[in-house]
Image (cartoon, rainbow, N blue to C red):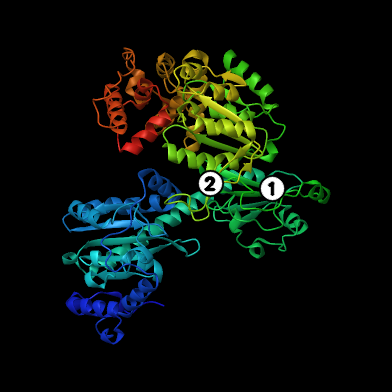
């Protein structure tokens, strides 16, 4: 029920009377809280706080999450962060010198981002109104964020109306952000400041800004739906006896193929249409592999559709032949039946050459592909060797033969975050852990392939745990004492010399022997002279078609410049260069003018020498030492991150992750 205006807005003129009502409430004298003084929403909120045993003398919010856990939480709420980004960016300008800040929080009340007047942001740190802190009523008492979540409506809470004593110097206005798809709460938007910044108009600003965020959420979801349909069209139109049901990222079925209806009936779905089927929570992106599936769905039918790490939706491929339904092994549905955030090879790809998408005429690469085809038939661990950007993940996908394909980059993650991503964790294992725990990447790869990129970056104290998993086929989630059986194929990749690292004591030799049962080296692009022009033309045609531009060619001078460049970032760098050039050069011929200056310069850049290590006593901590090294590398490379990563002898993806972790820019 919507609140009347007199209930929605605070009245600063009654502040002293509200303070007296609060003292009476704590002393157990309800008759001293007259209705004309205390708004009913505040009165009811105080009662909820009392029932939740919130400490009224509390001075500040709870301890915020660590930077790594906050980053992970923001990644899980990617849509909200993306939709709110323009609104939060505007807040930096229109809230300057207002003494207020704007905060966006998730559905659990955890603040994800703050922007606004810097003095207000500094003052907010005293009460922990900061990113990573959870501001629910049950933790912080009556406050705009928590009370808006409790009511699902716009709320203004001023000064003495706060339940906790330490927050009574503040005034705040907040409203919930609704998911345009189903109307569920997607987050909270709040504007807060010290009491003297109170204004009724603040609540109107919050409501209008939240409406902008909801509009952007609708655009993001529509764009994702288009990409999902585009990605799944081939599977839905391919003639086969299988029934295919396409579900979006929330678990709502949106499309059937020709045999889908009959296949659902034969499987025992109890529904013959999409409308009757309804939402399947166990197939939503956020719960895939954690929630129990309906009894009629078998885990082996599930194919998540993942694009660049984003879970677009899910295909449910139901064998259409009745005899095949009975032949398939039945697995009891469980919370761990399907791996979270996994990618699978389409069933229609079975029997096809998985390497047909690789563009090359180089004899060494063709030989590596031939050997990879042989290795695809075995389930022994394979170690892929090669510089960053040469296509190690593409080779790993080519060797993957079925089941989930799960990717984890070991570089750039803290030890704690890498451990939780790799092994998963139980409910309540640590502060900020998901309520239902989390399936790790190893467990998600059960029955398929686990691809560990940059395995040379794995911390030394985690390596014995991975070795134990490989030798015994069991994992322990963090916080659990019961082992879980896993059966997967490991494909690892690195640009480092692992035997040399093993001799230096950085990498375990026994783990190296376990993951390198056989090795496959992929040559760098600079050693594939004929492939540069071939790949450049391939990427040119691809991106011109992708961006709706007609056919084009590459000028001979541009081809010559591309062929003379060393390509430290290999194929990945070439792909990015061509895409950027396509967007800059509107004509039919791609010229040198659209290429980056480091490629077209006449003199080669000076050789990148490894940076000298800092003395142990030059910096107070390892984190600051690493920050200094990265800054020096970027400065020495004049902002070229590919060269900076080469100087640091780390993968470019690792450099990006570390820059984000330490708040660095080029």
| Residue beneath the point at 43% across and 23% down | 569
Q: Which residue is mark 2?
A: 311
Q: Quadrant of residue 60?
A: bottom left
Vertically, is 294 above or below 403? below
Q: Nearer the viewer, residue 14 or 323?
A: 14
Number of marks in the image?
A: 2
Q: How dense is the environment of label 1, judged by Cα within 10 Å: few (below 14), some, or many (20 and up)?
A: some
Q: Is residue 149 left or right of residue 464?
A: left
Q: How dense is the environment of label 2, judged by Cα within 10 Å: few (below 14), some, or many (20 and up)?
A: many
Q: Is residue 648 left or right of residue 184?
A: left
Rendered-image quadrant of the C terminus:
top left
Q: Dot 1 lies on which element? A: helix
- Where residue 222 sits in the image (x, y, percent)? 49, 53
Q: Nearer the viewer, residue 375 or 562?
A: 375
Q: Quadrant of residue 487?
A: top right
Q: Nearer the viewer, residue 275 or 169?
A: 169
Q: Dot 2 lies on which element? A: strand
Q: Is residue 559 left or right of residue 397?
A: left
- Where residue 120 sits in the image (x, y, percent)? 20, 55
| Residue beneath the point at 35% across and 38% down | 661
- Where residue 75 sits in the image (x, y, percent)? 43, 46
Vertically, is 193 above or below 36? above
- CA distance separating discs 2 and 1: 17 Å
Vertically, is 292 above or below 640? below
Tell me which label, 2 or 1, sits earlier in the chain.
1
- Where residue 482 sits in the image (x, y, percent)? 60, 46
- Name the disc covering residue 301, or none: 1
Rendered-image quadrant of the N terminus:
bottom left
- Name the disc covering residue 363, or none: none
Is residue 207 visible to the viewer in this orientation of the structure?
A: no
């Amino acid at each position: 029920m919507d609140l009347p205006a007199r209930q929605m807005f605070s009245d600063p003129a009654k502040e002293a009377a509200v303070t007296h009502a609060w003292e009476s409430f704590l002393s157990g004298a309800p008759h001293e809280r007259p209705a004309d003084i205390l708004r009913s929403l505040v009165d009811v909120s105080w009662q909820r706080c009392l029932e939740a045993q919130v400490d009224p003398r509390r001075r500040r919010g709870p301890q915020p999450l660590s930077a790594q856990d906050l980053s992970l939480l923001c990644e899980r709420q990617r849509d909200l962060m993306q939709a709110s980004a323009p609104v939060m960016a505007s807040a930096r300008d229109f809230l300057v010198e207002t003494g207020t800040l704007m905060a966006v929080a998730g559905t659990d009340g955890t603040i994800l981002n703050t922007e606004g007047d810097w003095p207000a942001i500094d003052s907010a740190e005293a009460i922990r109104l900061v990113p990573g802190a959870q501001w629910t009523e049950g933790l912080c008492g009556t406050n705009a964020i928590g009370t808006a979540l409790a009511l699902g409506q716009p709320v203004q809470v001023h000064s003495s109306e706060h339940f906790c004593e330490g927050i009574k110097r503040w005034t705040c206005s907040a409203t919930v952000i609704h998911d345009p798809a189903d109307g569920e709460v997607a987050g909270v938007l709040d504007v807060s400041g010290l009491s003297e910044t109170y204004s009724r108009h603040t609540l109107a600003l919050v409501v209008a800004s939240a409406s902008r965020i909801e509009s952007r959420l609708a655009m993001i979801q529509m764009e994702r739906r288009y990409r999902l349909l585009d990605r799944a069209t081939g599977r839905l139109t391919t003639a086969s006896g299988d029934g295919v049901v396409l579900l979006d990222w929330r678990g709502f079925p949106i499309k059937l193929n020709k045999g889908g209806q009959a296949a659902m009936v034969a499987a025992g779905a109890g529904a013959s249409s999409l409308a009757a089927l309804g939402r399947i929570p166990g197939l939503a992106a956020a719960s895939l592999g954690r929630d129990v599936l309906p009894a009629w769905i078998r885990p082996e039918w599930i194919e998540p559709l993942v694009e660049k790490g984003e879970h677009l939706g899910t295909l449910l491929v139901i064998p259409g032949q009745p005899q095949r339904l009975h032949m398939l092994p039945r697995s009891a549905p469980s919370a761990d039946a399907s791996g979270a955030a996994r990618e699978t090879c389409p069933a229609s790809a079975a029997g096809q050459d998985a390497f047909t998408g690789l563009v090359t005429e180089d004899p060494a690469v063709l030989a590596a592909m031939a050997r990879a085809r042989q290795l695809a038939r075995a389930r022994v661990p394979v170690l892929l060797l090669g510089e960053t950007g040469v296509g190690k993940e593409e080779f790993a996908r080519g060797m993957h033969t079925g089941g989930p394909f799960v990717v984890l980059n070991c570089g750039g993650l803290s030890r704690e975050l890498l451990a939780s991503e790799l092994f998963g964790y139980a409910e309540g294992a640590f502060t900020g852990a998901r309520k239902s725990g989390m399936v790790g990447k190893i467990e998600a790869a059960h029955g398929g392939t686990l691809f560990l990129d940059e395995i040379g970056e794995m911390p030394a104290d985690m390596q014995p745990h991975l070795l134990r998993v490989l030798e015994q086929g069991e994992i322990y989630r963090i916080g659990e004492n019961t082992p879980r059986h896993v059966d997967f194929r490991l494909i690892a990749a690195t640009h480092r010399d692992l035997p040399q690292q093993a001799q230096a004591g950085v990498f375990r030799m026994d783990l190296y022997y376990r993951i390198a049962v056989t090795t496959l080296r992929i040559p760098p692009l600079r050693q594939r002279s004929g492939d540069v022009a071939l790949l450049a033309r391939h990427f040119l045609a691809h991106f011109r078609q992708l961006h709706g531009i007609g056919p084009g060619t590459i000028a001979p001078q541009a081809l010559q410049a591309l062929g003379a460049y060393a390509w430290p970032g290999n194929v990945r760098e070439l792909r990015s260069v061509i895409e950027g050039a396509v967007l800059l050069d509107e004509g039919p011929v791609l010229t040198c003018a659209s290429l980056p200056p480091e490629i077209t310069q006449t003199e080669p850049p000076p050789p990148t020498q490894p940076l000298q290590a800092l003395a142990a006593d030059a910096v107070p901590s390892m984190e600051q030492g690493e920050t200094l090294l990265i800054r020096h590398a970027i400065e020495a490379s004049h902002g070229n991150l590919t060269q900076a990563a080469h100087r640091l002898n780390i993968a470019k993806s690792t450099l990006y992750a570390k820059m984000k972790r330490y708040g660095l820019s080029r």
